[in-house]
Amino acid sequence: MTTLQVLVAFLQLGLLSFGSVNLASMERLVVQQHHWISQAQFVQGYALGQLLPGPNVLAILLYGYGADGFPGALAALVGFFVPPAAVVLAVYRLTQRGTGWLQRAYRALLPVGAGLLLAGLLTLARGSVTTWGTAGIAVVAFGLVMTRRVPPVWVVVGGVAAGLLLARPPA
């Protein structure tokens, strides 16, 4: 594994992640195709990204680290964020001219973003909702955020506590 391979892989992921991280594509690349990390490590990295302050996509640092240590983490960060940031800045400059077709294009992309998020949700569920207990935690977490407006950080802390209570000690 070379740092350049990690850079190219995360460059592709960054340029294909419209509106959100395309978790399904990321999981396919880093777990199934390259075998840089396991499915469990992928889900654990994402969960850690949800728990810590800042953008949850910083879990890519863990994925890059799994591929090639510290150079891989840096390559993942640069590849995933720098080129897409340049595209965003360029599009922003173009949109300042007030063209209506760009606003229509934005509205047309919203369902695509929703579909990508659903694909990511299924990717995470496949690796983490594996028992009735974990399914219960997922349903309660969803309900607390959607109906009670509980801040996600408290839902994560409660979910960790529930997971620890439900976890079986290693045999």
Image (cartoon, rainbow, N blue to C red):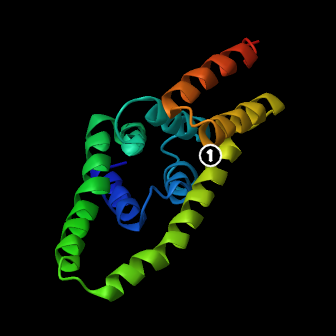
> Which one is in front, 120 or 140?
140
Residue count near mark 1 (Cα–Cα under 10 Å), binned few <14, some 14–19, many ≥20: many
In the figure, 154 relative to 64: above or below? Answer: above
Horizontally, is 14 left or right of 85 in the view?
A: right
Judged left or right of residue 157, residue 69 is: left
Q: Position of residue 22 (x, y in %)?
A: 49, 58
Residue that protrudes farthest toward the right in the picture = 132
Q: What residue is rendered at 40% in x and 37% in y?
A: 62
* Kind of residue sitting beneath label 1: Leu
User: Which residue sits at x=83%, y=32%?
Assistant: 132
Choose between 158 and 36: the one closer to the eye. 158
- Examine the rendered structure and indicate whether residue 100 appears above or below residue 45: below
Q: Position of residue 16 (x, y in %)?
A: 41, 67
What residue is shown with label 1? 124
Q: Position of residue 107 (x, y in %)?
A: 45, 76
Q: How many marks?
A: 1
> Residue drawn 40% across and 45% down?
57
- Where residue 148 sits in the image (x, y, percent)? 62, 35
Q: Quadrant of the C terminus?
A: top right
Secondary structure state at the residue bearing disc 1:
helix
User: Residue 44 lies in what quarter of the image?
Assistant: top right
The residue lying at 52 percent from left, 54 percent from top is: 23
Examine the rendered structure and indicate whether residue 67 appears above or below residue 166: below
The residue nearer to you, when weighing 125 against 94, is 94
